[in-house]
Amino acid sequence: MKRLVIALTTLMAAMTATAQTSTHDQQKPFGFCTRASRTASTAYDITGGGCYDYPVTGVSTSKITTLTATGKDMKNDIGNAIKKFDVIILDGSQGDFIVSSTISLSSISGKTLLGINNARLCTTWHATQEILDALNAAGVPQMSTSSGTGGTLSTGTKVSEEAEYNTRQIIINMTGDTKESYRSSGIFSFKNCQNLIIRNLKFVGPGSIDVSGSDLISFTGTKNCWVDHCEFTDGMDGNFDITQKSDFNTVSWCCFSYTERSYMHQNTNLIGSSDSETTGYLNTTFAFNHWGQNCRARMPMARVGKIHMLNNYFTCTGSGNCINPRKNSEFLIEGNYFAPGVYNFYGQTDAISVTWGNNNYVAERANGMPSSFGTTVTVPYPYTVAAASDIPAEVGTHTGATLFTQTGNETKIAAIHADADDWTFHNLAGQSVSGNGRGFFIVNHRLIMK
């Protein structure tokens, strides 16, 4: 393939600036992550590892570490860094971080994870086209997902649902993986953790498939966390689930989606794993998030908690229920924007209370707008509702890993070689950095990785 050569001799800027952000973005923790009570204004000082911006200030250098990708499995490197340091910077300038299976972290607190230079954490396994063809040939998409319709795998494991049973047995037959190790294809599992800040990271999974596998990120018993400006794509089971006595968490300015890699079960965000969840927990703020391409359900589906849905953006055309209040939950739904083509924007079952604000915008409302019921739902923190009309432009532009976007390589560039798939830039000292599958563009003589 013919290559384009661009000669440059200008100085690349060091990474000292962040991308332009929305006027509605507070750029600091807010919502339930800053509270210690679901009803009273009892504050919680969420600090993470002592910062939430890059460059890092106010934290001893002995408590900070920066990881760059090696091209090999970095599961242990990332897990050990989180256990040892307070601030963990993941630098994507050398490529993606490969994670062979879910990084399980238990009882950690006071940590900040920051992504710079387009940092992506990617799982290794995904269903091949051969596997997907076999699932289609067996009619798996038409099979039941109801409990009691499954069977017993050749390994002796009982599976309750027909679609999951057949999917798992076909994969065992085709791969010989009797341990079903592929089902651990997630990124992070946080159990009984507290005071975490996770910002500006991209999480890429193997594609959704109905095998009761791992989520990209899961919180169990985890409290007072702020997940902000992150991207979640192609989680195996869910993109980001919060369950089992987790509490006081905020998810803001994040985007959720699925690509053609996903096959079934594009159920993106579950709050509460069953109707028997202990009441009084799972209080969660979702603010200024975007549910987009191929999201089919659970945006979120929630039980038990008090859930604040503030100024979120839904462009998931063809989906099932988007916002889905379930058993023992309370929802406050304000200033959200449901784009044309999003017909099933809401559905509830056995919720205690729902307060549906008259400031939500729904393009497709053939069956009218939902009605509030139960006691008026309130939250114990200050906030401002943006106009729903602002949401497509503001959230559509500024969600996801849009912070800290300039390159950190301060060097003179001699030339850039690029084709449709690969790029290489060379500095005047003869050093080079290459990549695959990422674009770049040049603004004011600066090389910016997409």
Image (cartoon, rainbow, N blue to C red):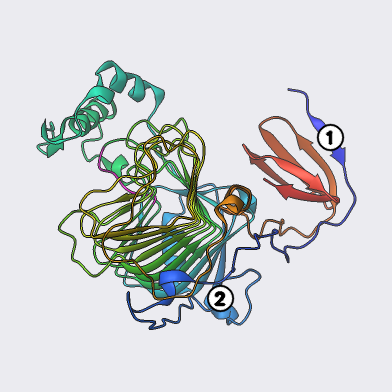
Name the foreground residue: 198 vs 427.
198
Residue 2 percent coordinates (x, y): 78, 24
Residue 209 picture location, percent across and down: 32, 35
Asked whether the residues under the numbered discs 2 and 1 touch, taking CB atoms below 8 Å apart as contact, a structural biologist would say: no
Prevailing secondary structure class for the magenta stretch in the rendered image: loop
Query: Nearest the camera: 313 or 429?
Result: 313
Categorize mark 1 by other alpha carbons within 10 Å: few (<14), some (14-19), many (20+). few
Q: Quadrant of the N terminus?
A: top right
- Residue stretch in magenta: 211-216
Position of 418 compared to 110: left or right?
A: right
Residue 51 circle label: 2
Any magenta on residue 414? no
Q: Amino acid at mark 1?
A: Val
Figure check: 84 above or below 308: below
- Label 1 sits on residue: 5
Marks 2 and 1: which is nearer the front? 2
Q: Amino acid at mark 2?
A: Cys
> In this rendering, would 158 be left or right of 117?
left
Does residue 232 appear left or right of residue 70 in this picture? left
